[in-house]
Image (tube, rainbow, N blue to C red):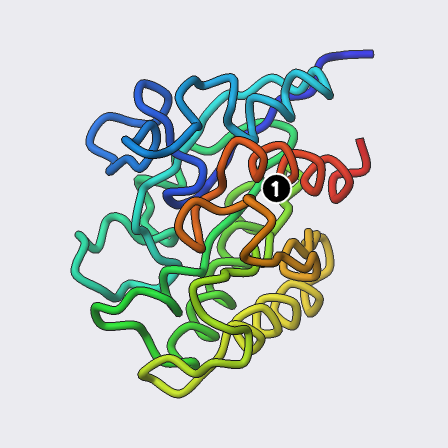
Amino acid sequence: MNTKTFSILADSISTFAGYVPEGNELFYPREGSDVTRVEHTWWHILSERTSLKLLMNESYSGSRISRTGKRPITSSFLDPSRQSRLRGDIIIVFGGTNDWGQLEQPTTKEIFSDAYEELVSTMLELHKDSSIYFCTPLQRTDRALDTMNVQGWTQNELSQIIRNRVQAHEGAHLIDLAAYPIKPDEGLLLDGLHPTRKGMILLASLMQKGLML
């Protein structure tokens, strides 16, 4: 069997110093986190378990699907420079929590929904030789699933928008990470959002199951 290749388009949860494009903001490694080595990241664990070869980790801490927020517009998942670096048999798209959860200018539900529709349709057109897997965000524990943000929508609505947009497109695949329940006392998240080493192991398992590898 030929070794399959993959790329990642993601936010802070998938960053690690030295493994993302220069200029992309980082979260890992970070003081207070036990994710201290690249071997602790979910994508490295996934690669080791499945023999998938990572070609590009296009992760950017704080990045959003939509072209909103205080970071450069080029940090959007829709930006052509980010899109152009993606290649491989599989592309994993893992983001959206920043559109909903950032305290600084969270976007509206309508803008997010339109942006995710653009993301799915654009990626299917640009990356016809890749199988593309779109992920709902992991459940956050810093706020309840039914808690509204300042724009009046919830984590549950965030995940449902992604499900609806992906399922409406033939050829787009869904990995429903948000369907996995996470409790604050399980030690899976450092700050209610970013995985610990234990959380990374779980995330790798959920990704592997979603990819059916």
Q: Is 51 displayed left or right of 14 in the figure?
A: right
> Residue 13's image quarter?
top left
In front of the other: 74 or 204: 204
**What residue is rendered at 51% in x and 23% in y?**
40
* On screen, residue 34 above or below 117: above
Q: Is 12 displayed left or right of 169 in the figure?
A: left
* On screen, residue 168 above or below 131: below
**What residue is rendered at 56% in x and 22% in y?**
44
* On screen, residue 98 above or below 129: below
**What residue is rendered at 67% in x and 40% in y?**
207
Q: Is 90 displayed left or right of 111 in the figure?
A: right
The quarter of the rendered structure image containing the C terminus is: top right
**Residue 95: x percent and y percent?**
46, 53
The quarter of the rendered structure image containing the N terminus is: top right
**What residue is rendered at 43% in x and 28% in y?**
34
Amino acid tagged 1: Lys
Judged from this view, the residue extending furthest toward the bottom is 152
In front of the other: 55 or 122: 55
* On screen, residue 201 above or below 11: above
In front of the other: 76 or 43: 43
Q: How many marks?
A: 1
- The local secondary structure at tag 1 comes to loop
**Residue 200: x percent and y percent?**
56, 35
> Residue 46's image quarter?
top right
**Residue 113: x percent and y percent?**
48, 75
Q: How crowded is the residue under tag 1: few (<14 C-alpha within 10 Å), some, or many (20+)? A: few
Find disc 1 in the rendering and name its residue.
128
